[in-house]
Image (tube, grey):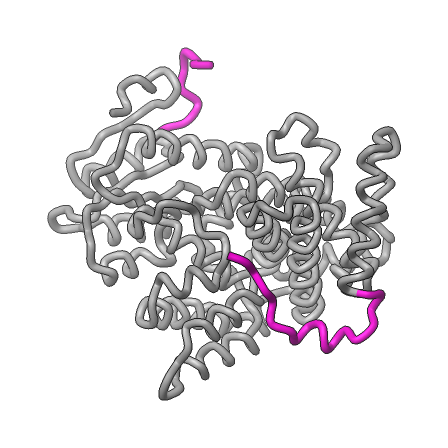
Amino acid sequence: MLYPHRQEWEMFFASGADEALSLLETQVIDIVIADMKMPRIDGAELLEIVRREFPGTARIVLSGETEPNAVLRTVGTVHQYLAKPCSAESLRSTIERAVFVKELLESHAALQSLIGRIDVLPAIPALYLRVAHELQSEEPSLKRIGELVSQDPGMSAKILQLVNSAFFGLPREIDDPTRAIMLLGLEVTRALVLSVEIFSQYQITKLGGIAWETLWSHSLACARLAQHIARGEWPDDARVQDRAYITGLLHDVGKLVLAAIAPEGYRHAVKEAAEDSIPLVEAEGRQWGVGHPTVGAFLMGLWGLPIDLVEAILWHHEPQEATSSEHRELILLVHAADVLADECGFPSGNPMGGLDQVFDDEPAILARFENWRSMAFDLLGQGVDRQESDEQVIDSPPAPESTPPHSV
């Protein structure tokens, strides 16, 4: 299946986990694709070893397993799950996407390695408690759990990662965490929440520089606003509206990742941004050579989320750099929602400037932004009744090189 791509990728084939580990000791491998059923060491065990020993390597399971428990064993270990029978096109596109996002951080090997150690994104402890309480009730409601999960970027991302895996064989990508919860069912949801809960224990003491309530309020406001604008621009396209909501919710996930993997460094970046009056993304760049948009896009892409969502996260601070992207509309929308949420009293913690500062030479875009600004104030106001807005339930509608640069 992969033979036609031998000029693009340097490929190694192993008959079992022991042989694979020997290869990893002698070769720099970008991506490992493992069968689930293997003698002695199965796919889940192998990829857990890879996670610990070679954290910068992308980890993909290719399996014919049909039991939910088999999939749950890979949660927190694998980046993507491919189901057998797997077409050549599906395998190729999965590898290409993994290569694409790894290239985002190709010159930042240390940071890429650190990101590879993150099993789940951190989330807000209060929401976890509310979800756990609902799960423990006599008649837990998946719909209510979905509404709670929709308010949290970290848990939303993990739920979407699993439900969009090939294991579920869905005819279309699921963008809405509530829909995902309904498809996953109670037991799978319970297992996921428990696995994420373990990581949440470290939030208060381990994560640096993050004002949780501020970040949550801003992300939620950005999601609501992006969806609201999308409904006005594309009233008959539910898919665009869904994508706008979830991208708005996840646009700042890179902040969570950086604060989790380097809490002291992130505290320093936040302090530097405040003292020097510079955008936080610039202070992050000084600290690591890369900012939270790139980090967030890297992880979301590695998890297999749609490429338009990945690009919108990547360029949400620099939409002018994405002029050639076929997903520019979503990029502009999320950029605008991010800035306008700040203007409406839901700050990101470090404002990045007005909408007109990057598009002075594109009056058509500026005119659209002014219309979107009016829509934003109509929806969110200017910081009035903020607490009431925070607590509302969100309506989320339905060319080859002679030497291959990457090894699989």
* Coordinates of residue 188 in the picture (x, y in percent): 32, 67
* Quadrant in the picture for residue 15: top left
Pick the residue in front: 263 or 238.
Answer: 238
317 w.r.t. 214: above or below: above
Q: Residue furthest top?
A: 402
The residue shown at (37%, 52%) is 52
Regarding residue 272, the answer to whether it shows in the image is: no
356 w.r.t. 376: above or below: above
* Quadrant in the picture for residue 160: bottom left
* Quadrant in the picture for residue 20: top left
121 w.r.t. 92: above or below: below
Total numbered circles: 0
The residue shown at (39%, 48%) is 79
* Coordinates of residue 317 in the picture (x, y in percent): 72, 43
Q: Residue furthest front?
A: 236
**Left or right of residue 331, residue 308 in this image:** left
* Coordinates of residue 255 in the picture (x, y in percent): 63, 55
- For the C terminus, which image quadrant? top left
Q: Is residue 21 magenta?
A: no
Pick the residue in front: 10 or 133.
Answer: 133
Q: Which residues are magenta?
A: 381-408
- For the N terminus, which image quadrant? top left
**SS assignment for the magenta stretch, majority:** loop
The residue shown at (38%, 55%) is 162
Q: Residue furthest left?
A: 39
Regarding residue 112, the answer to whether it shows in the image is: yes
